[in-house]
Amino acid sequence: MKKKKYALITGATSGIGIPTAIGVAKRGYHTTLICRNPAKGESLKQRITEETGNHDVDIILADLTSLEDVRKASHSYINSGKSLHLLINNAGIINTTHEMTQDGYEAMFAVNYLSVFLLTSQLLPLLKSSGDQTDNNSRIINVSSEGYKMAKRIDFENINAEKGFKTFPVYGHSKLALMLFNLELAEQLSQHPVNTYTVHPGAVNTNLGSGDNTILSRFLFPMLRPFFKTPEQGAATTLYVAFEPKADGQNGFYYANSKVRKLGKQAKDSVQAKTLWSWTDNRLSEFYN
């Protein structure tokens, strides 16, 4: 008899998160969704159950712009007593205006990177122990973007983009941070039964970047969306990496279009990755345990 597998997914109630969650549940995983909006969470839970026949779907409410919420979400999952074989850090934002979180960080950097670092760090012991109990390693999938190439390095003197905000460079900076996190995490997991990956879903027709009155939101994004992938197409690489047997053991790999892709040199800078890890670890230490 197969052992029950468990998955945790962030950002599941919109964009590529929806087909990702449905795809994971179809595989029979006990699926937990971290959601900000309770109504959307319950609606997706019902949809997953109806489409997959899988009733093992749970919801944890959290706003990923709040590091305290991220901490509480991780503890909620740990205290549930469930194992964890698959963590999909899917949530991400792209803002067209400069926004700061209640913790004092630029919002894209907070959601796209800091929340991932904190959630993953808190869940690592559980991922390690769950990997030990099965034939396959546990997997961490960080949804990134080729946009990381818009940043050449981590600018520690301008983390919050206070010296000038431009949507795409700031977004790229947050995604480069995520790539470097994955690089260092892979090294730290080299002797443990956990693999970590980054994936590029492609340009996907979602609500990212919508909701304000800037030129980008009103004109550029709507003009480009007809040429973007569907959410289902965007989720395909995440699901491939989650379940493809060949990916087992490919620790630290970067995927796009369900194929391994080479990393740009800025995403392979192990010195900067270690520096960023240390900087982040110090900044987030108050939220540990």
Image (tube, rainbow, N blue to C red):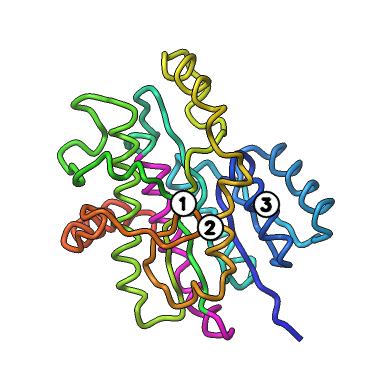
Q: How many marks?
A: 3
At 56% from the left and 66% from the top, the residue drawn is 86
Q: Amino acid at mark 1?
A: Val
- Does the magenta segment cover residue 150? no
Kindly indicate the quadrant of the structure image that contains residue 281. bottom left
Q: Amino acid at mark 2?
A: Ile
Secondary structure, mark 1, is: strand
Q: Whole-Å distance between the Cαs marked 2 and 1?
A: 8 Å
The stretch in magenta equals 109-136
Q: Disc 3 and disc 2: Cα gap in Å? A: 14 Å
Q: Are marks 3 and 2 in contact (CB under 8 Å)?
A: no
**Residue at (70%, 81%) from the top-left corner?**
3
- Please tell me whether the stretch drawn in magenta is mainly helix, strand or loop: helix
Image depth: mark 2 or mark 1 in front: 1
The residue at which mark 2 appears reads as 88
Q: Which residue is mark 3?
A: 59
Disc 2 crowd, CA 10 A, few/some/many (<14, 14-19, 20+)? many
Q: Which residue is mark 1?
A: 143
Which comes before the other along the chain, label 3 or label 2?
3
Q: Is residue 20 left or right of residue 92?
A: right
* Most foreground residue, 69 or 25: 25
